[in-house]
Image (cartoon, rainbow, N blue to C red):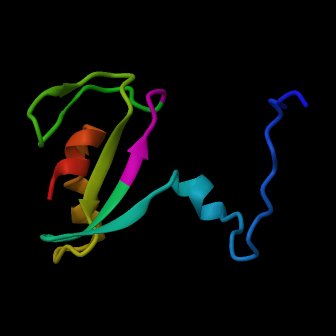
């Protein structure tokens, strides 16, 4: 019998559901690192319109390059200050940072 190239549907778990916050927040998540909790949000290449310097490698992140934005989730000075201190990382640099 010939092989079918049609994608097969997998039954969805009942626990898995669509959450509007994933659409609104763009996949933002919280990660625990040795220095505390961090909000991590991926930025697509289309959403990257400015140039940034990665704090991990000190190289430039060019406009149009997908990358990761991070900021403290447990800062002492409040959410507004944490958000103002966010940094743009190459995704790889953030991943290997431990």
Instruction: Name which residue lies at 84% across and 31% down.
Output: 4
Along the viewing direction, whichever of 36 and 63 lies nearer the viewer: 36
What range of the chain is rendered magenta?
41-46
Does the magenta-highlighted stretch encompass residue 42?
yes
> Hey, which residue is sitting farthest right in the picture?
1
Q: Is residue 6 left or right of residue 68?
A: right
Q: For the N terminus, which image quadrant?
A: top right
Considering only vertical position in the picture, is 40 above or below 15? above
Q: For the C terminus, which image quadrant?
A: bottom left
Considering only vertical position in the picture, is 9 above or below 90? below
> Hey, which residue is sitting farthest left in the picture?
58
Q: Position of residue 77 (x, y in %)?
A: 17, 74
Q: Is residue 7 left or right of residue 18?
A: right
Along the viewing direction, whichever of 79 and 41 lies nearer the viewer: 41
* Residue 89 position by quadrant: top left
Q: Position of residue 37 (x, y in %)?
A: 25, 71
Q: Position of residue 13 (x, y in %)?
A: 73, 71
Task: Work out whether residue 87 can be spotted.
Answer: no
Instruction: Name which residue lies at 66% across and 65% down.
Output: 19
Instruction: Name which residue lies at 25% across and 26% down.
Output: 51
Q: Is residue 45 left or right of residue 78?
A: right
């Amino acid at each position: 019998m010939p092989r079918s190239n049609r994608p097969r549907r997998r039954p969805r778990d009942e626990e898995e559901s669509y959450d509007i916050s994933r659409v609104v927040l763009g996949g933002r998540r919280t990660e625990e690192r040795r220095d505390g909790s961090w909000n991590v949000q991926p930025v697509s290449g289309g959403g990257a319109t400015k140039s940034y310097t990665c704090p991990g490698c000190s190289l430039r992140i060019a406009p149009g390059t997908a990358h990761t934005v991070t900021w403290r989730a447990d800062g002492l000075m409040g959410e507004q200050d944490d958000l103002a201190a966010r940094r743009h990382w190459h995704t790889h640099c953030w991943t290997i940072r431990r």
